[in-house]
Image: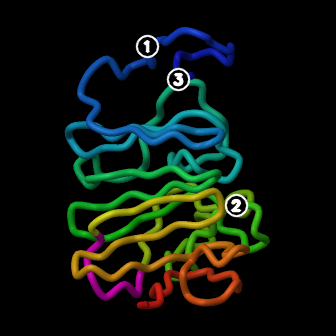
Amino acid sequence: MGDGTTKDRNTPVNVKGLNSGIVGISVGWYHTCALTDTGGVKCWGRNSFGELGNGATADSEFPVDVIEPASDFLDVKVGDVTTCARTRAGDLKCWGWSGNDGNGLLIPASAGCHPVDLMSDGCSRPALMTGLSDSIAAISFGLDDACILTKSGTMRCWGSNLYGELGDGTTIKRPFPGIVMKL
């Protein structure tokens, strides 16, 4: 709940330290992230795969700062055990689950999660997704998949693709953003 406890609540509670300055929020199964009006990201909840982006894997009952300049982000989206954020420069940075067994959203192989950052098969700090030819306009998550919309209007998706949700005409898992087929 972000209030410093692990108690279930059936009424709204204040999130510890986030009384003002929040311009966006994204909620996943086990963690939540908030975008601040200064472009910082704060996350809380489960952190088994580094999905809070604070360089650790310990869970947090209250918001912690994502390791990144506090003015870098324009948007943040949370998946099951992965988080991605759009930067002011139009890039995409992701953290959290980086495995490839389909049990969570994949951090693309192009994200550059260095071995020093790997903790419990995840990136515990933001990793830049490389190889994209255009700036990111929007991001969206499903349970095991994600898509980005570039500023030139191209949609690219990656993840499990079990039901063809990546739009590439296959059901083959894609560990990096692929272009959605045109009709």
Q: Position of residue 57 (x, y in %)?
A: 66, 46
- Label 2 vs 1, first from the N-terminus: 1
The answer to whether 40 is drawn above or below residue 14 in the figure is: below
Residue at the spot of label 1: 14
2 is within the stretch colored magenta = no
Mark 1 residue element:
loop
The answer to whether 92 is drawn above or below residue 157 in the figure is: above
The segment highlighted magenta reads 130-136
- Pointers 2 and 3 in contact (C-beta within 8 Å): no
User: Toward which corner of the image does residue 29 lie, by quadrant?
Assistant: top right
Q: Position of residue 170 (x, y in %)?
A: 66, 89
Residue at the spot of label 2: 104
User: Toward which corner of the image does residue 30 lie, by quadrant?
Assistant: top right
Dot label at residue 2: 3
- Eye-nearest disc, 2 or 3: 2
131 is within the stretch colored magenta = yes
Q: Amino acid at mark 2?
A: Gly
Furthest toward the front, the residue is 183
The answer to whether 180 is drawn above or below residue 42 in the figure is: below
Q: Is residue 120 left or right of residue 65?
A: right
Q: Image point 51% across, 50% down: which residue?
A: 78
Q: CA distance from mark 2 to mark 3?
A: 23 Å
Q: Image point 51% across, 46% down: which residue?
A: 54
Q: Nearer the viewer, residue 149 or 32?
A: 149
